[in-house]
């Protein structure tokens, strides 16, 4: 069995490189406007492919395990937002307003798909249920996350749910996603047969958005507005948030489900999707504020990968009749 990697992968390194490049060579003026249109097209293509590769059959096939899926959705769209909203007054004192809004935004996102399934498989969990739960979370997240963002961020005093934003959400996210679902019957096989192409579009679009987001934010003085202690507290906030959700999902899973299903709740219920989060943020927030909004998500993403990799390997070693895990 291949050992999960604790160091940043090439995608994370690309995101870090985009931030560094934007810090020293931000895109400005007329080129920024052209770049904005290019990223809009990239996001539409990204969600079109998300719609084309998301298997409705997997969601329907696993729907019988409804208690498990409801618990995963409750962790993703109830527990996380409740924690984020409860912690927001404290975070507003410890962080900058943009970073505090970014942490709250993290709490409103759907679960990941690939890594949730991968860690469930490594740990010896119910992979088919993980496919269903993660897919269902992403399907609902396309609609729920913008609604929750408008509700929670407005309550916390941040913009994020105006009518122009709703129009952008429909045109840039919902319609391409729905078109991908419709086109799945014709192109679903091609999408499945060319995962590297899909991955390139997926990750490339996110890197483009990150560079554009941080460029606009740097021009507005992002790094002058974020003191070092705020960044330190941001790491702590993301880590504590993840630890609380992992503890709750672990406890509920042990109390209500078999070992295999409990692992699904643990991994699918504790994750947040970078692939969906950054494009949705780009649609919801002004370009000048976007860098601070997505920074908490990028940090949370790496923390969750490191923590869940360690948990998955430990669970694999203690699985019934498990072979020794090497490496």
Image (cartoon, rainbow, N blue to C red):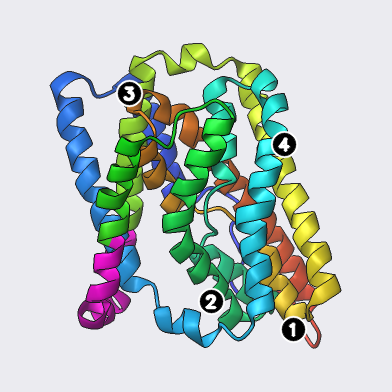
The vertical placement of 267 against 238, above or below, is: below
Q: Nearer the viewer, residue 20 or 294?
A: 294
Residue 197's mark? Answer: none
Q: Are dots 3 and 2 in contact, CB under 8 Å?
A: no
**Magenta stretch?**
177-201
| Residue 92 falls in image quadrant | top right
Query: Which residue is labeled 1 in the image?
Result: 323
Q: Residue 255: say if magenta.
A: no
Q: Residue at x 38, y 28 (%)?
A: 214
Rounded to the nearest angstrom, the CA distance separating label 2 from label 4 is: 30 Å
Query: Farthest residue toward the front?
Result: 163
Residue 132's mark? Answer: 2
At mark 3, the secondary structure is helix
Q: Residues within 10 Å of mark 3 (few under 14, many from 20)?
A: many
Where, quadrant-wise, is the C terminus in this rendering?
bottom right
The vertical placement of 192 against 103, above or below, is: below
Query: Which residue is labeled 3 in the image?
Result: 216
Rounded to the nearest angstrom, the CA distance separating label 4 from label 3 is: 30 Å
The label nearer to you, 3 versus 2, is 2
Q: Are dots 2 and 4 in contact, CB under 8 Å?
A: no
Which of the marked residues, 1 or 3, is nearer the chain's N terminus? 3
Q: Residue at x 29, y 66 (%)?
A: 178
Which of the marked residues, 4 or 1, is nearer the chain's N terminus? 4
**Which SS does the magenta portion mostly show?**
helix
Query: Which residue is labeled 4 in the image?
Result: 86
Q: Position of residue 40 (x, y in %)?
A: 23, 44
């Amino acid at each position: 069995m291949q050992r999960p990697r604790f160091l940043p992968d090439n995608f994370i390194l690309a995101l870090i490189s985009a931030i560094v490049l934007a810090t020293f060579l931000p895109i400005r003026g007329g080129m920024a406007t052209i770049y904005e249109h290019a990223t809009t097209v990239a996001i539409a293509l990204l969600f079109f492919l998300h719609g084309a590769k998301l298997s409705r059959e997997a969601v329907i096939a696993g729907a019988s395990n409804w208690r498990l899926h409801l618990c995963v959705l409750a962790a993703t769209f109830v527990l996380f937002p409740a924690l984020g909203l409860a912690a927001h007054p404290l975070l507003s004192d410890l962080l900058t307003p943009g970073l505090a809004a970014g942490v709250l935004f993290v709490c409103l996102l759907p679960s990941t798909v690939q890594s949730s399934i991968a860690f469930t498989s490594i740990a010896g969990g119910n992979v088919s249920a993980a496919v269903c739960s993660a897919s269902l979370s992403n399907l609902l997240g396309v609609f729920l996350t913008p609604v929750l963002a408008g509700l929670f961020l407005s309550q916390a005093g941040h913009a994020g749910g105006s009518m122009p934003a709703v129009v952008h959400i429909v045109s840039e996210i919902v319609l391409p996603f729905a078109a991908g679902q419709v086109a799945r019957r014709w192109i679903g096989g091609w999408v499945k047969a060319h995962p590297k192409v899909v991955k390139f579009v997926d990750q490339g679009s996110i890197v483009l958005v990150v560079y554009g987001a941080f460029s606009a934010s740097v021009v507005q003085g992002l790094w002058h507005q974020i003191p070092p202690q705020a960044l330190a507290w941001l790491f702590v906030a993301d880590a504590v948030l993840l630890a609380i959700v992992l503890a709750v999902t672990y406890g509920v899973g042990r109390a209500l489900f078999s070992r295999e299903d409990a692992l699904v709740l643990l991994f699918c219920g504790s994750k947040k999707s970078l692939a969906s989060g950054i494009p949705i943020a780009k649609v919801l927030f002004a370009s000048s504020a976007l860098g601070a909004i997505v920074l908490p998500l990028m940090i949370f993403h790496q923390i969750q990968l490191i923590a869940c990799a360690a948990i998955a390997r430990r669970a694999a070693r203690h699985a019934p009749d498990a072979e020794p895990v090497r490496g």
